Amino acid sequence: MWIADGWKDYEVIDCSEGEKLERWGKYILVRPDPQVIWSTPKTEAGWRKMNGHYHRSAKGGGEWEFFSLPEQWSISYKELTFQLKPFSFKHTGIFPEQAANWDWFGEKIKQAGRPIKVLNLFAYTGGATLAAAKAGASVTHVDASKGMVGWAKENARSSNLESAPIRWIVDDCVKFVEREIRRGSRYDAIIMDPPSYGRGPKGEIWKIEDSIHPFVSLCAQLLSPEPLFFLINSYTTGLAPSVLSYMISIEVGKKFGGTVDAQEVGLPVTNTGLLLPCGASGRWSSES
């Protein structure tokens, strides 16, 4: 498991009975987590004195209950600063476990010794975009949601990266990639964070089990002659790390060599010393 253990402004304090107790800066949130199937005593004070609690509904979805929580606040990871806003379906605007990947590809970009062009697909609020830009890459950030791209720009300003070479694109990721192939565009690195299920701006349906392999095959056509890395993140429990590894090996490793690895991504739990799994990542690197 790749562990995101470099945070100071965030921690998973405890988890029990389908929920996790988290600290986001100075605020305590309780959110559901399907991986937490165990029941342990909730002795931490935060379980009784949280600032926000997302209650999952038996019918699907759910709603927030707030106790003295601002509409927006910020936390930092190393040199990056993110604006947080609790919104629909339990999210806050950042997936902290992804810091394990930010550190990994940030070092690759810094050590490349050449200009690196990164394509970030399903780019959400820009965590990976900003980590890549901070490391010195030029980044094309693509997301189908205008609101998410706006939020990512806000995070860029907070991180003093408003002047960084970032191209902000609101578009369906599949259609954007198809157009980039026709235009002859090339990228040295590709990051993708596909949803389990989603719709594009014009109602295009994305279902990860059906769509991911054809999409990876498409994206491989955008790689430059000497690519640096390829990263896929998955929050879908049905896609095991070995599946990600095999798919990347077929579409990228076979053509470019290098190495492929895939692991669960996780966060340390302060109260128990356990590691909470938060999905999986598949990585291809040009280094053999």
Image (cartoon, rainbow, N blue to C red):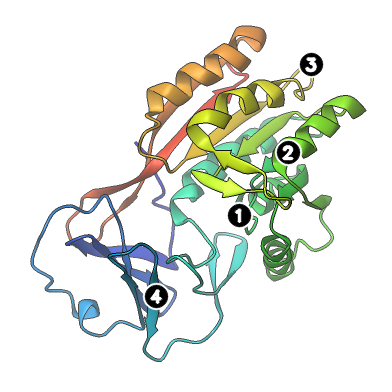
The residues tagged by marks 3 and 2 sit, at their Cα atoms, a distance apart of 15 Å
Locate residue 35, reporting x and y percent.
Answer: 26, 49
Location of the N terminus (image quadrant): top left
Q: Secondary structure at mark 2?
A: strand
Q: Nearer the viewer, mark 3 or mark 2?
A: 2
The residues tagged by marks 1 and 4 sit, at their Cα atoms, a distance apart of 25 Å
Q: In this orientation, which residue lies closer to the viewer: 153 or 87? A: 87
Which amino acid type is marked by label 3? Pro
Which amino acid type is marked by label 1? Gly
Q: Secondary structure at mark 3?
A: loop
Judging by the rendered image, the residue that carries numbered circle 1 is: 127
Q: In this orientation, which residue lies closer to the viewer: 21 or 268? A: 21
Q: In this orientation, which residue lies closer to the viewer: 69 or 177? A: 177
Residue 119 marker: 2
* 221 relative position to 276: left or right: right
Q: In this orientation, which residue lies closer to the viewer: 176 or 6? A: 176
Earlier residue among tags 4 and 2: 4
Judging by the rendered image, the residue that carries numbered circle 4 is: 63
Earlier residue among tags 1 and 4: 4
Earlier residue among tags 3 and 1: 1
Judging by the rendered image, the residue that carries numbered circle 3 is: 225
The residues tagged by marks 3 and 1 sit, at their Cα atoms, a distance apart of 27 Å
Q: Residue at x 39, y 22 (%)?
A: 242
Q: Secondary structure at mark 4?
A: strand
